[in-house]
Image: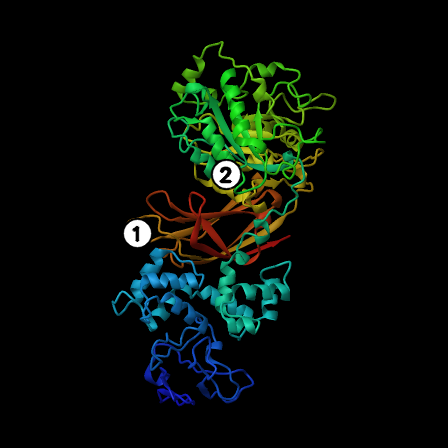
Amino acid sequence: MDSGRDFLTLHGEARQLLKVKSPAHGGRRAPFLPSCRSDCKTSSWQESPQGHAGHPDVPSCVNCGYRWLQLESSMALAGTLVGSRTPGLFPYFLPSWIHSCLRKADKNKDNKMSFKELQNFLKELNIQVDDSYARKIFRECDRSQTDSLEDEEIEAFYKMLTQRVEIDRTFAEAAGSGETLSVDQLVTFLQHQQREEAAGPALALSLIERYEPSETAKAQRQMTKDGFLMYLLSADGSAFSLAHRRVYQDMGQPLSHYLVSSSHNTYLLEDQLAGPSSTEAYIRALCKGCRCLELDCWDGPNQEPIIYHGYTFTSKILFCDVLRAIRDYAFKASPYPVILSLENHCTLEQQRVMARHLQAILGPMLLNRQLDGVTNSLPSPEQLKGKILLKGKKLGGLLPPGGEGGPEATVVSDEDEAAEMEDEAVRSRVQHKPKEDKLRLAQELSDMVIYCKSVHFGGFSSPGTPGQAFYEMASFSENRALRLLQESGNGFVRHNVGHLSRIYPAGWRTDSSNYSPVEMWNGGCQIVALNFQTPGPEMDVYQGRFQDNGACGYVLKPAFLRDPNATFNPRALAQGPWWAQKRLNIRVISGQQLPKVNKNKNSIVDPKVTVEIHGVSRDVASRQTAVITNNGFNPWWDTEFAFEVVVPDLALVRFLVEDYDASSKNDFIGQSTIPLNSLKQGYRHVHLLSKNGDQHPSATLFVKISLQD
């Protein structure tokens, strides 16, 4: 085309003229010079008589029939057509697959897009965006001040939302000089960059089929830049392994071989002293995959047992109402067994009421007899699917039920956490309770405890001396558990191979704060109970650990924590099968649509990223990026960190994003914690969670990860 002219003639019946900004006229964008396939020498354009995705006037090459809108994706188009067009058509600068989405979203067919219509447009494109950012960009693009966008304003809006330099660069590395990725190029990217074990034509084609929005590119077995971005933002492009989002571990091993998602004082919504109790707290915990719930049971009025934190001013709820909530939600998030940890302070009469409620409300869900053939070790989660187990005091042993009674059964509750609390008023009420207030256990309730009999811990077994039976389990305060780990780390590990151990927070945590669960997991402790109602780094790590294995609430411990002859000691690390030194490199490239946490109208996010390693003490580490000022929409760091990890099976990686504040504590923006064994390599998006553990719909980090021996 002559650079001094403004018009390109299209040959065909309509003889339509399209105006193109050319360099001679100082266009603000580089010229769009259409070119065909490499083997076509003509580049002479006409309207397509067959039409393109329902648009009959889309131009195609006279010589080879290659259609213009097949050439480039929207983010790669450099030119802009601004002249004549058929009424009712959106501008040619957007590819055809977007045209159909625009039409669907344009409800009143006025060829303009209100903000609500653009939100629908983004949904059609499967693009998630924070409404506040979308509204801000909408206002910037609405140069006509009509509260709607048209023509070039729509292009500007779409590009501002989707154009990302780092994606352009990554795509160019993979595609070379081409505008699309072929199957072979995508396979190479999946092999060399993403380190996908299943990389091959089948995986590449499935990704094109799943994420490529252009039907034309899909038909040609190619991926455009739009499809590439959609892949990277999807579950397939996530830093968390897609394969680990389903149950993939062996679920046929004894219960003691698994970490179990467990809640402490599940009924509380707030603190331990005066906060409200609610059945809603049980529902929330179960919906998060929790598999061990606590019920603190006391005598209530009208012969109805109640649940609350004894000797405190927390509110009270009915035991029967809690059971109904558990019945309705126990297996919504996971089919694997739920353990009800009873802290029983009821008299014999109300214990019998409890037993009747358990049987009547839970019905066949309740495990009230021994499984056939399970007499020497704990049953597996697979064997106990759909079952609810009771943990509590029991008269006698597993066989025969209701047989011999032991001295420990004279006292119903084997741990009274209120007695450990450091609130003076609470301790005073505990100390002044009547001496004769030692409650005995009702046979009816005892018979319902099968595989989780509560006992006091009598020390680790030694050769030649009988220890705990496999169905007996002890509870430890966090302080006692830490002492045992320090004094006899390997003994605790071996004990936890065949027995369940429950850990609960120290008595001084009246504010419902949490302890780190990692040290307990390192010692093989299974039921590490946290206050689910209290957000913070401890719950972040907890949720990260249990998103593994399909978030079913059970995670198989590493082999060295399941070996009865294990020599592993988390407090005195030595060489062994657990030692597998790795070098982890994490390049934090950019962030996307980080939510505004300070609601001050003039406040703009100043984000920084911290990458943490949690695991054995030798592996614990933390690195921080610089602070990016006034940019929460698309901050750019491009900073690489290196970590040495020696026990990768116990390691987790936490990505924390904060809003930096020079004068006070940084504001939490979002985080994601991923077990190292679930961390994918290559270019990945880390999808951030809120303080309460909920998914931010559009907030991500773009990273590159590599893991080497």
> What residue is shown at x 53% (from left), y 25% (from top)?
342
| 357 shown above or below 69 | above
Residue 655 shows in this picture? no
The image position of residue 436, as x and y in percent, is 49, 9
Mark 2 vs mark 1: give the one in front.
2
Relative to the observer, which residue lies in front, 105 or 167? 105
Question: Could you classify mark 2 by the number of other residues whose Cα lies within 10 Å: few (under 14), some (14-19), or many (20 or more)?
Answer: some
| Position of residue 273 in the picture relative to residue 37 (left or right) | left
Q: Which mark is residue 603?
A: 1
Coloration of the structure image = rainbow
Sequence-wise, the earlier of marks 2 and 1 is 2
Task: Measure the C-alpha gap from mark 2 to mark 1.
Answer: 41 Å
| 406 shown above or below 318 | above
The image position of residue 620, as x and y in percent, is 54, 42
The image position of residue 260, as x and y in percent, is 57, 36
The residue that label 2 is drawn on is: 329
The image position of residue 197, as x and y in percent, is 64, 58
| 278 shown above or below 14 | above
**Amino acid identity at mark 1:** Ser
Relative to the observer, which residue lies in front, 295 or 554? 295
- The reply to whether the C-beta atoms of the residues labelled 2 and 1 are less than 8 Å apart is no
Question: The residue tagged with tag 1: helix, strand or loop?
Answer: loop
> What residue is shown at x 44% (from left), y 35% (from top)?
281
**Amino acid identity at mark 2:** Tyr
| 671 shown above or below 310 | below
Quadrant where the image shows the N terminus: bottom left
The number of numbered discs placed on residues in the rendered structure image is: 2
